Amino acid sequence: MVELDKNSINKILCIKLKGIGDVVLSTVVLDNLRDAFPKAEIDFLTEPPSKAVLEHLPHIHKILLFKPKEKFGGIKTILRVFINRYDLILDFYSNPRTAMITFLSNAKYRAGFPYRGRTYAYNLLGPSERNAFHAAQLHLEFLKKIGIQTKSANLHFGLAEKETSFAKKFFEETFTKNDFVIVLSPSGGWASKKCDAEKFAEFADELYRIYGAKFLIPWGPEDYNDAVTIKKMMNVEAVLAPKTSIAEGAALMAKAKLVLANDSGPMHIAAAVGTPTLSLHGPTDPALQGPFGDKHAWLKMSELDCIGCNLLICPRKHECFLSMPKEMVVEKVGELILKNKIQIK
């Protein structure tokens, strides 16, 4: 292993592929990299769906897109990274493909996680513990391990004026200024992570009864039926969001007072844009994958023997969500209101 000479770093590449939520969590490094290397160019290699997260962030000089379905996509990416002549590559994904990209980059400093079969690619190693830290905190531990000081724990999502104007106009036309607007986000990467529609509706009805809340239900292509079902099952009115881009959906969540969400990309986006977020967990561990930061909270039924199973399809009766009392949700929402000084009129 080598020792990082910070004065020799002029070009940096961060690598994070796959899920949008994972890329959002990796943005926790950006303030710290800018602080440690104020004059360096910071580029980011990711996949096309995550471009929306990064393209309006002032920290980032250039976004490189890896297109796994493109013919010779891997070779093209290797060549592009090699041609760009980076001084430091931070491989926060560290799978066999990104390890190869890093190894062939000819960068002086190549940092990655010490996963089996991949350490050949790196001369700086992040922490070996996979489940000892929250997924965002793990990125900060990575920086510390290779000698980069961490002062910030902020997540980021880049919003352009177009998206913020869209959200502002939508809220002005749909809600009043003092409405306590809660976003109900039904998204989830796999079936067992999704809270049942009947429970979302139950939670919303109770939040209306106690706080007079108004509700907005955003959706992506995979979530439309869930969103419509939640709206139909509620006893109070809810607004189904229009079809939006990822960035427009983020801007809508940024305008809300609170977000109630499954463990999902939109949950992490909500946290990144600064909206207090309450996440509902069954098969996943909120200590590792919950909303990151002190503004937020999570719920899980800890007493269940199957909790945190990580199974894609529930082999039981989805007790992790169906047995969740509405009183627990109301209590956590109350805590978030007090903690974040949310005004309700």
Image (cartoon, grey):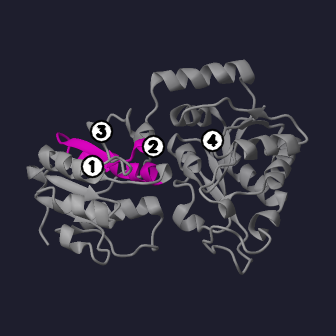
- In the orientation shown, which residue stands out farthest toward the right? 235
Secondary structure mostly taken by the magenta-highlighted segment of the chain: helix
**Mark 1: amino acid:** Leu
- Residue 189, image quadrant: bottom right
Q: Earlier in the sequence, mark 3 or mark 2?
A: 2
In this view, the residue in front, 177 or 69, is: 69
1 falls in the magenta region: no
Circle 2 sits on which residue? 49
Task: Give residue 60's mark.
Answer: 3
Query: Is mark 4 in CB contact (under 8 Å) with mark 2?
Result: no
Give the distance between the C-alpha atoms of the residues marked 3 and 4, in whole angstroms.
29 Å
Lower sequence index among marks 4 and 2: 2
Helix, strand or loop at disc 3?
A: loop
| Distance of label 4 from label 2 (alpha carbons) | 13 Å
Image vertical order of residue 187 relative to residue 298, above or below: above
Which residue is at the far front?
71
